[in-house]
Amino acid sequence: MAFDARAAKLLALGEFLTVNGCPGLRLNASKLHKTWTYRYRSGDKIRQIKIGRWPVMSHTAATVAWEELKKRRDAGEDPAQAKRQARTEKVVSVKVERYTVRKLCDDYLVGHVDQARKPKGAKEMRRLLNAHLDAIEDRPAASITRADAFDLMEGMKHIPVSAQTLRGELGAAWDYALDAGRLPDNTPNWWRLVLRGKLRSKGRKRAGKSIGTVKRSLNGGEVGKLLRWLPNFSELMSDALTLYLWTGTRGSEIVAMESTEMTDEHDGWWWTIPKHKTKNARHENATDLRVPLVGRALKIVKRRLKVHKGWLFPADSVAGHTIQQVIGSQVANRMSYSTVHQERELLCLPVENWSPHDLRRTTRTLLAAMGCPDAIAEAILGHMQGVYNRHHYDKERRHWIMKLDKHLEALAAKF
């Protein structure tokens, strides 16, 4: 029928008018409005798209709009589907625009870092991400360009280790957001690409001079001198540093020793470090670390067990035990180049330029020099074995730690 304005006004709820010469064009009546629509077939489905409200949109204007939609339909397009897609893209665009770098990093910290890292590591990641993102934190994460990523990393080249760590964490944060669908799939992860291999440590400086990046290992003569000098330290310091050499364990593991971890078994004393205390805790295949206690290490543990129940290195700290950094700072204070050493007139160490962790490296080097197979030496240090190697090496650990004990005592007596 030709369009009749009077008939249109009288349309009841649910009724509609069609227009001659305009197949699919309808005026539909709802409770409050009368709406122009274009109704058409798409495959085996009937689709409908809203054109406008009558009488705001006149019959003539509706006809013009219908003609445009019909042309698109005849050309193979589905107008209703295209409209829904455009609406969805607009919503996604708004969400992407509001998803800032700060929000992305917060999601990564809460969703991944807090779940996979120890509290100390999670705290450090928060500090790092909070300290260096001021220039981009309020930007939409999807808008970060390669130049943005390069400029941020380039601005941190004076602290290359922190820059390298931040670059890796931001790369992981972007991957996390992409996996979660919070960034468009085509968003590039520039952090994985910029300055690859170019952010390298320049090494430490001591007394204003660079000492490079060489990893320190004490030679036999230095080990002997150090062992004879250790009584000049406090008992806590002497015990902790001795345990580094006699067990090859990490400082964080030593200071967190507990009496419940010590057992007297059929083949001797063992210190079993729970998996959650080791550096490998995040690995599914990691196990508790079994450490044979012999020689000076066993004497230290037995002596401390008589005095302490619980932590063997107790302290008034949040953790309840001595903090690893205390051991490192006490060693540093005894170096000849230390200003603390000069101010307090402390007795200077006979061996220079080393840290407690270098003693762990020294133990590994001594084991290699003695002919200890790599797999056993790595097991002693608590490093992960290959995926297919499920052997625990308890017997072998004790054998080589006993040989190491004799070798260390010989060094202490010889030099």
Image (cartoon, rainbow, N blue to C red):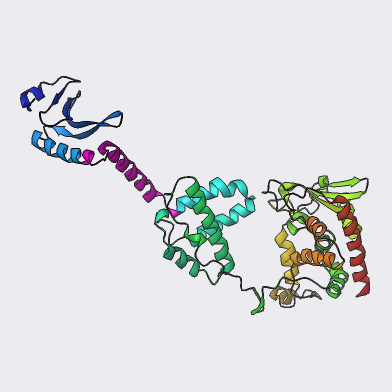
Residue 373 image position (x, y, % from top left): 83, 61
The answer to whether 377 is drawn above or below residue 209 in the figure is above
Residue 199 image position (x, y, % from top left): 56, 69
- Number of callouts: 0
| Residue 242 horizontal side relative to residue 105, left or right | right
Residue occupying image coordinates x 80% and y 57%: 375
| Front residue (pair 368, 227) | 368
**Quarter of image, res 71:** top left
Residue occupying image coordinates x 86% and y 69%: 227
| Front residue (pair 196, 343) | 196
The answer to whether 72 is drawn above or below residue 382 in the figure is above
The span shown in magenta is: 72-101
| Front residue (pair 156, 391) | 391
Residue 84 part of the magenta-drawn span: yes
The answer to whether 346 is drawn above or below residue 285 in the figure is below
Residue occupying image coordinates x 74% and y 49%: 388
| Residue 62 horizontal side relative to residue 266, left or right | left
Residue 376 image position (x, y, % from top left): 82, 57
Principal secondary structure, stretch drawn in magenta:
helix
Q: Quadrant of the N terminus?
A: top left
| Front residue (pair 225, 235) | 225
| Residue 34 horizontal side relative to residue 205, left or right | left
- Residue 61 appears in the figure: yes
Q: Quadrant of the C terminus?
A: bottom right
Residue 169 image position (x, y, % from top left): 55, 57
- Residue 236 appears in the figure: no
